Image (tube, rainbow, N blue to C red):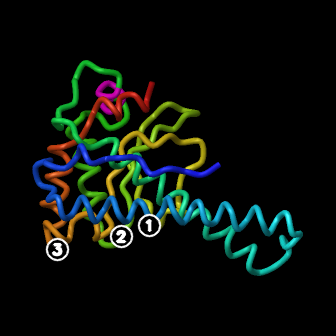
């Protein structure tokens, strides 16, 4: 089964995100989709040929996590953008944030602070499926550090490609633009 890149061009025109930045980001995402497909084909061929004990198979298998998660994290990220950045305070997600963090404001402060940490990666608001609570996590690499049995609710890309074209080194400006454009309906759907 081949993966197909989704069209996120509807995001062009969002406040704080230039068309150049978004088009570059869409191209990067397309690369993750293409590489996921190439790796899927290569691994299937090596399995069929009985080459699973080779170092090449092992390295491709390891690389698959990077490419696949790069594809999926970008999809979650793009899908939770394009909104007006206002969370319905009477909704399920708002109540869960208040329960887990004490208030929406405390959650937002923690999410922004996590995004401002030095380094590259992702900030993910996770829902622990087992306990039901929410927490923010820093993910360094696409394929490392994801939390088992947790569902991503809100995803923010903090690799430089997500903001350098528009914000330079001012990551806080990017985070502010991100918050103005959160599609809370997408995030809300992920907790139901």
- Packing grade of label 1 (10 A; few <14, some 14-19, many >=20) is some
Classify 10 Å Cα crowding around label 2: few (below 14), some (14-19), many (20 and above). some
Q: Secondary structure at mark 3?
A: loop
Residue topped by disc 1: 140
Residue 171 sits in quarter = bottom left
Tell me, yes or no, whether the two marked residues, 3 and 1, touch with CB atoms within 8 Å.
no
Residue 120: numbered disc: 2
Residue at the extreme bottom of the image, as rendered: 55
Circles 2 and 1, Cβ within 8 Å, touching? The answer is yes
Looking at the rendering, the stretch of residues picked out in magenta corresponds to: 93-98
Label 2, secondary structure: give it.
loop
Closer-to-camera residue (58/131): 58
Task: Answer with mark 3 or mark 1, whichever residue precedes in sequence.
Answer: 1
Image side of residue 163 versus residue 119, left or right: left
- Compute the Cα span from label 2 to label 1: 6 Å
Q: Is residue 70 magenta?
A: no
Dot 2 and dot 3 residues touching (CB under 8 Å): no
Pick the quarter of the image with the C terminus.
top left
């Amino acid at each position: 089964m081949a993966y197909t890149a989704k069209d996120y061009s509807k995001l062009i025109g969002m406040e704080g995100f230039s068309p150049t930045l978004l088009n570059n980001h869409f191209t990067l995402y397309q690369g993750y989709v293409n590489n996921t497909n190439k790796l899927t084909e290569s691994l299937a061929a090596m399995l069929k040929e009985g080459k699973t004990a080779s170092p090449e198979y092992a390295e491709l298998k390891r690389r698959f996590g990077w490419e696949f998660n790069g594809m999926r994290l970008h999809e979650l990220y793009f899908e939770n953008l394009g909104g007006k950045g206002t969370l319905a305070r009477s909704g399920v997600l708002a109540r869960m944030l208040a329960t887990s963090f004490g208030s929406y404001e405390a959650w937002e402060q923690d999410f922004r602070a996590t995004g401002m940490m030095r380094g590259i990666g992702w900030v993910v608001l996770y829902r622990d499926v087992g306990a039901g609570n929410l927490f923010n996590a820093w993910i360094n690499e696409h394929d490392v550090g994801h939390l088992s049995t947790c569902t991503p609710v809100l995803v923010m890309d903090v690799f430089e490609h997500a903001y350098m074209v528009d914000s330079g080194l001012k990551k806080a400006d990017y985070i502010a633009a991100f918050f103005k454009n959160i599609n809370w309906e997408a995030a809300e759907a992920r907790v139901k």
